[in-house]
Amino acid sequence: MAATEPPDAYEALYQPTFINVEGQRWINFGYALIGGSTLIMIFQALGVGPSVIWKWADDLTTVCFTIELLVRIFEKGFLFFTEDERNWNFFDSLVVAISLFSMIMAIIATADAADGKPGNSSAMDKMKGLRTLRLLRLLRLFRVLKGVEEVNNFVEVLLNSVRMVFLGLIVAAAAAAILATIAVSVGAGAKSWLSHHKLPSMPKID
């Protein structure tokens, strides 16, 4: 009877290509980014020093988080979407997407505010809304606590909610497209019929 091989004898699913994204150094790098980003947001909120410096530092950390995520996707490939920690991968992707969106919109709003054209008076209101959106980046602090079961459950519930909202938007968009197609078809058919037929005249009432 053949001897059973121990679990360690099997090759791990993830094999590093250029960077070991499951190594402790890479994990510590991610924690350092989270800590640095959190401190920057705190300094921004407290108004410590020139705000433009913290704004640039904040954008830099957003770029670093994006690169970190892209490296993990490149390294793991399809495994990024199927491994046991896929919920955390999706969670990180969501937070990075929020960060990128808020950064881009902040750049646009800043450009609008600096523009002297009329009609840009709402630029400051947009900036206030973006500050609220950027606070959602604090969700990445949960990544430090991903070993806690309650945090894992929260992330799973959050992602399920996002999926349901996304699916709801898709269904709503599909329904709107179908209704629009029906309306256009009915309108085109009615126009074609009227081009070859005349509606009966209304009887005169004495």
Image (spheres, rainbow, N blue to C red):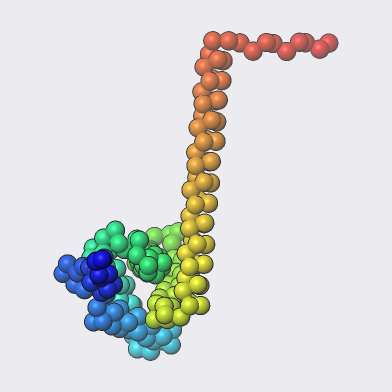
Q: Residue at x 35, y 84 (%)?
A: 35
Viewer-closest of 124 and 162: 162
Residue 184 visible at all: yes
Q: Is residue 161 left or right of residue 200?
A: left
Residue 141 visible at all: no
> Residue 27: x, y in percent?
29, 79
> Residue 134: x, y in percent?
43, 72
- Looking at the image, is 193 positioned above or below residue 32? above
Q: Residue at x 53, y 51 (%)?
A: 168
Counting every numbered tag in the picture gives 0
Q: Is residue 173 left or right of residue 67?
A: right
Q: Residue at x 39, y 60 (%)?
A: 117
Quadrant for the C terminus in the image: top right
Quadrant for the N terminus in the image: bottom left
Viewer-closest of 118 and 205: 205
Residue with the most extreme front position: 1
Residue with the most extreme left position: 18
- Looking at the image, is 56 positioned above or below residue 108? below
Viewer-closest of 20 and 196: 20
Q: In which quadrant of the rendered view does residue 197 lie? A: top right
> Residue 36: x, y in percent?
33, 84
Q: In which quadrant of the rendered view does residue 107 lie? A: bottom left
Q: Residue at x 39, y 81 (%)?
A: 144
